[in-house]
Image (cartoon, rainbow, N blue to C red):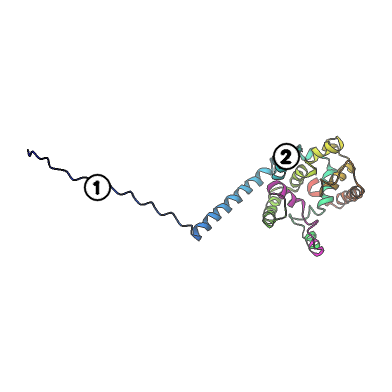
Amino acid sequence: MSETAEKKPRARKAKPAAPAPRPRLTLKRLRRWLLRGLAGGIGVFALLILLFAIVPPPINLYQLQESWRLGGIEKDWVSWDEIAPVMGRAAVAAEDANFCSHWGFDMTAIRQAIEAGSNRGASTISQQVVKNVFLWQGRSWPRKAMEAALTPAVELIWSKRRILEVYLNVAEFDEGVFGVQAAARHYFGVDAKDLTPTQAARLAAVLPDPKNRSASKPSDFVRKRTRQILSGAETIAADGRSACFER
């Protein structure tokens, strides 16, 4: 054996592998992500529409905002059978007299609104339900576009009675007071099933502007509007325009 140990060559340290290049955000990849997001959003809304066809919507964005602002809100869901029939007729007479004959959009009202240079009176009960339950308040184009897309789906899956039932349970009747049951208790101290025709008409009269109108202390305008709604409710009952939710 040799006195001088043979020196072994030192092993060279392997150089760390270069990091893999990050994938570039190509137009094709961006389009794929957008399509996936769109498909996911459609799926979520489709599921909610199916669910709320039988289950009461728990709360909406506007109610959450008002609850945060006011420190709480009044709301109490009641089924269709717990609402006085005249309340449904009054709401339809006040807000959407052609409710039973359209598929979500009242084209006659829309044309009249366009000719008058305003969108006042063109929004149907179905559109208001979509806005109140699934979307946010305001008049932005994205919200209007989503409302236009969702309204036919709701009309297709929900019955007219269900649409009106949800509407009466989520509509605001006074600041922080949502739904016909809470409104009936708040204004008149009765349950929604015990509303008289005049009380129902007064509630319907405040629907477009609940923060500035009162059903228990009606202004001259609200009194006049109440008489008009009473007459309208009788008319739609007589000519069959309430048949879709009363049969």
Give amino acid for label 1.
Answer: Arg
Percent coordinates x, y for residue 221 in the rendering: 90, 50
The boundaries of the magenta stretch are 113-137
Q: Quadrant of the N terminus?
A: top left
Residue 102 appears at what percent x and percent y? 76, 56
For the residue labelled by badge 1, is the local secondary structure a helix, a strand or a loop? loop
In the image, residue 126 above or below residue 182: below
Of the two numbered discs 2 and 1 on the same chain, state the one appearing first in sequence. Answer: 1
The x, y position of residue 166, in whole percent, is 74, 44
Residue occupying image coordinates x 68% and y 47%: 134
Residue that mark 2 sits on: 67
Within 10 Å of disc 1 (Cα), the crowding (few <14, some 14-19, many 20+) is few
Q: Nearer the viewer, residue 52 or 209?
A: 209
Query: Which residue lies at the image location 77% right of the left edge and 45% below the top edge?
Result: 171
Residue identifier under label 1: 12
Q: Residue furthest front?
A: 4
Relative image position of residue 132 (x, y in whole percent): 72, 47
Between the C-alphas of marks 2 and 1, the distance is 69 Å
Q: Amino acid at mark 2?
A: Ser
- Residue 131 falls inside the magenta stretch: yes
